Amino acid sequence: MSILHSQETLVESAPPTRLVFRPNSMFSSTISDGASGRALYSVKTKILGVVRTDLVLPGTKEVAAQITRKDLLPDTVAFREPGSEKLHKTKLNKWLSKGESIAGQPLPTYVLDSALHGRFKIRMHSEHRLALFASDDTTILAHWDMTPCTRSGSFALAMSATLDSASRLQILVAFMYLEQKLRNLEESGRKDSRTRASGGAELPDLNPYAFGSPNLYASPMVGAAFAAFFQSQN
């Protein structure tokens, strides 16, 4: 079910905005408006001693948001300040903090403190994979739309039409960060299962989206760097 038909509290009658990832990658993709097909962001990732993912405005070099994953120091997130090219950076664990753990779930609840734009909760959802709730904890405002992604190779985030543009960008970045964290945990579990099934010898990885898009992971050097980095995080 979507935002409009969820068993949780309904938030609107207008259709939600859908942000479509092509390909299905949190590291290297184009994010487009699901209704118009207009490109909104290009997702680009570089390894510069850290793993830095930029959301770039199409046709420009302007970075709207940035996620920096670090090995030893805390991860950071940055957003472009209104009316300037300057990025305001903060520690990611202050902006997106861990909440209560949920029995049987690999990820706890996360609290997104968007300062001027409100406080939200993101947690795993049996139908939507990840869902964002209002502070009252019953109203779904955003969730992964799982319907078209398996066959088309795309992945979509549905957002309530009531959210303002600044909140949408912060929510988008939070979903991207947590989705990749969840994929890393799932891949780690698959590796453990393959190792047990083979009597101790690890079988080849058959999941092309484990660390991003197939094109990004296809490079042996880039793939090894991503694998080493994320292995250290699990």
Image (tube, helix red, strand yellow):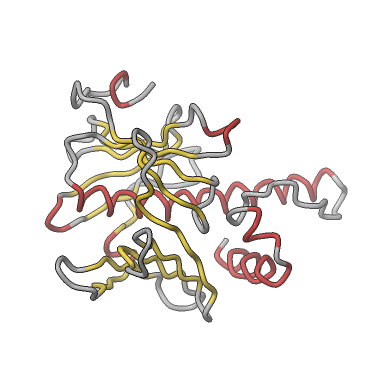
Residue at x 24% of width, y 34% of height: 160
The reply, left or right, for residue 37 in relation to residue 80 is right
Residue at x 52% of width, y 57% of height: 28
> Looking at the rendering, which quadrant does residue 59 occupy?
bottom left
Residue 37, position in %: x, y?
39, 39
Residue 213, position in %: x, y?
60, 53
Q: Quadrant of the C terminus?
A: bottom right
**Which one is nearer the viewer's eye here, 24 or 85?**
85
Q: In which quarter of the image is the N terminus?
A: top left
Residue 126, position in %: x, y?
45, 29
The reply, left or right, for residue 157 in relation to residue 119 is right
Q: In this view, does 10 lie above or below 54?
A: above
Specify the farthest residue to the front: 59
The number of numbered badges drawn on the structure is 0
Residue at x 57% of width, y 54% of height: 184
**Which one is nearer the viewer's eye here, 216 or 34?**
34
Specify the farthest residue to the left: 116
Residue at x 52% of width, y 79% of height: 48
Residue 85, position in %: x, y?
23, 74
